[in-house]
Amino acid sequence: MRLPDGLVGATVGPLVHDIDARWLMAYAAALGDADAEYMDTTRPGGVIGHPLFPVCYEWPLAVELRSALTEAIAVRSVHATHDLRLHRRARAGDRLRTTATVISSEPRAPGAYVVTRLETVDAEGRPVSTTDYGSIYRGVACERASMAGGAAHADSPSDAERSGDAPPGAPAWSATVSVGAGLAHTYTECARIWNPIHTDKAVARAAGLPDNIHHGTATLALAVTPAVARAAGPATRIARIACRFAGMVPLPSTIAVEGRGAGPGRLAFRVLGADGRPVLRDGWMVIAGGAAGGDARA
């Protein structure tokens, strides 16, 4: 089984989303994050999006790109890496336009590793977010291919800046997060991200999973919330968030987020499952100056 020729360079979009306070608040609520910056519509400038909110408006295009694949290949996709450059937070009243392009593919031991770049701009064409979304298609072969500009970012962290599977010394902080039995359903509806392996047991088992599993983006968001709280609070300007997904989170479950500093303006983190093994590793966040919204309204 192989990826089709010409997949690298395939583009879909632009897709336009009108962002309202209801969607922004619902996403934060799904994560149990009730800070005023995400919930208080009387706040000057209104509410702002959680740092991981871009996954909400990006998801439909990720699904559309998969339509270029056969169903037999598409169902083998696993979210492997996530690298978000956040130019500013989404705000109520935004009209955002997103385009998705497959920028690279390469063979790896588990299967074909494919990176899709999702670029979002506002109504004036100013950048809002750029995400490199990496997927592994298990058991699928592919050729190594890359578009111009599709290589790994030159400023990706070194191994010393990552949290890894076994970071040296004790973490600077940790947080225990409960993942309830119905959280995947809540996250699905609030994020508007529909993938039935997270909520439909029959579909999950047909895909070879033991049961429903938590969304990878939700696990990342649950890790980012305490990390942001320790940085400077929800209005902190976050410039970049990246990680590798290392395991599944069953429902219900408990996860532990561990973090530490990783150089000026950087914070490293990982997430451990209930068995103490990493389910998310090499997590890191870049903290920039200024307010989260990118202007006085934030």
Image (cartoon, helix red, strand yellow):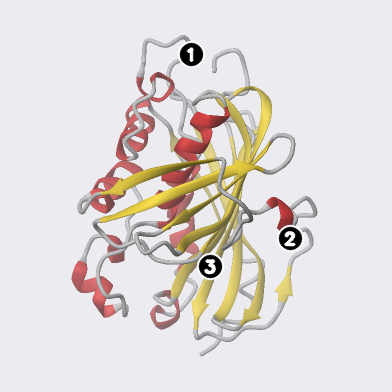
Q: Secondary structure at mark 1?
A: loop
Q: Quadrant of residue 216?
A: bottom left
CB under 8 Å between discs 1 and 3: no
Instruction: Tell me the distance, in whole angstroms, between the alpha carbons under discs 1 and 3.
Output: 36 Å
- Asked if residue 257 lies left or right of residue 249, the reply is right
Q: Could you tell me which residue is drawn at 29 percent across and 47 percent down?
A: 178
Where is 24 relative to 188, above or below? above
Read off the residue under disc 3: 135
Q: Residue furthest front?
A: 169
Mark 3 is on which residue type? Ser
Count neighbours of disc 3 (C-alpha within 10 A) and say few if under 14, some if 14 to 19, many if 20 or more: many
Q: How many marks?
A: 3
Read off the residue under disc 1: 45
Count neighbours of disc 1 (C-alpha within 10 A) and say few if under 14, some if 14 to 19, many if 20 or more: some
Quick one: 155 or 228, which is closer to the camera? 228
Residue 83 seen in render: no
Read off the residue under disc 2: 152
Q: Quadrant of residue 205?
A: bottom left
Name the spot of residue 58 as percent of width and height, x first: 49, 49
Where is 122 relative to 109, above or below? above
Name the spot of residue 184 as percent of width and height, x first: 28, 53
Q: Could you tell me which residue is drawn at 57 percent across and 23 percent down?
A: 293
